[in-house]
Amino acid sequence: MNDQPQERLARLGVSLPSRLLDELDTMISDRGLTNRSQLIAELVRQAVTKHAAVEPGAVLAGTITMIYQNNKGHIRNALAQTQQYFIKETISSQHVFLEEDHSLEVLLVQGTIERLNDLCDQMRAIRGVNQINLVTTRTLLPPLHAHGDEAGEIEFKKKEVK
C-alpha cells in the first residue's frame, strides 16, 4: 500500500485536430492505458523534464545507453576511464555483449545537465562508440551514501556460529 498522500488532480480541457486525437487514441490502445489522461500526463511529464534539461544547473537522474564495437581494444578501457573521471555522476553500469562484435552498456547517472552532457560528449568522442542516448528525469535518486552519526550508523554484531 502506498502511504504517500495522493496528489490533487486538476481538470484540463484540450482541443486537438481530429486526426491527432485519433493518433492519440491509437497510442493509448497500443500502450494498454485505460484513458487519455494517463497518456497526456506522461507526455506532459516528458516535456517538463525536457524543459528542465535546458535549465542551467538542473540536477537530473537518468540513463545513458551506448552501443559500441568490441573489436576496438582500447574502447572498454577508455569508457571505464571516462566513467571514473565522472565518478560523482556515474551510479552504476550494466554491460552485455551483442551480436557482430558489439556491446550495449547502460549507465545509471545523476548530476547537473551540464555534467551529464559532458559525460556523453566525452564518451561519444571515443572511437568505436556508435550510439549514445541520454534519457533524464527530474525525479532524483535518494542519497546513496550517509556520512557519520547524522545517518544513524548501524552497528553489526558478530553472530556466533555453532
Image (spheres, helix red, strand yellow):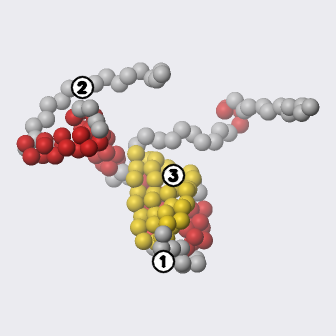
Expressed as whole percent of the image width and height from the top left, the position of residue 131 reads 41, 67
Q: Is residue 94 left or right of residue 114?
A: right
Q: Secondary structure at mark 3?
A: strand
Please tell me whether residue 77 is drawn above or below residue 112 in the rendered image: below
Report, in whole angstroms, how far the alpha carbon at label 2 lies from the one at label 3. 33 Å
Name the one closer to the observer, 88 or 134.
134
Does the CB distance between marks 2 and 3 fall below 8 Å?
no
The foreground one among 17 and 146 is 17
Residue placed under numbered mark 1 in the picture? 127
Q: Residue at x 14, y 31 (%)?
A: 13
Type of amino acid at the residue the image marks with label 1: Arg
Q: CA separation, marks 1 and 3?
A: 22 Å
Q: Residues within 10 Å of mark 1 (few under 14, many from 20)?
A: few
- The mark found on residue 10 in the picture is 2
Please state which amino acid type lies under the numbered disc 3.
Answer: Leu
Image coordinates for residue 149, horizontal then vertical, percent:
71, 32
At a point 60% along the width and 42% down the height, the residue shown is: 144
Q: Which sits in the foreground, 25 or 48?
A: 25
SS for dot 2: loop
Q: Of the residues under marks 1 and 3, which one precedes in the sequence? A: 3
Q: Position of residue 27 (x, y in %)?
A: 23, 44
Q: Quadrant of residue 28?
A: top left
Which of the 4 quarters of the picture holds residue 22?
top left
Asked if residue 143 can be seen in this view, the reply is yes
* Image coords of residue 128 (percent x, y): 48, 76
| Residue corresponding to mark 3 | 108
Choose the circle earlier in sequence order: 2 or 3.
Answer: 2
- Mark 2: amino acid: Ala
**Residue at position x 7%, y 44% in the image:** 17
Question: Relative to 77, does residue 161 appear above or below in the rendering?
Answer: above
Q: Which mark is residue 116?
A: none
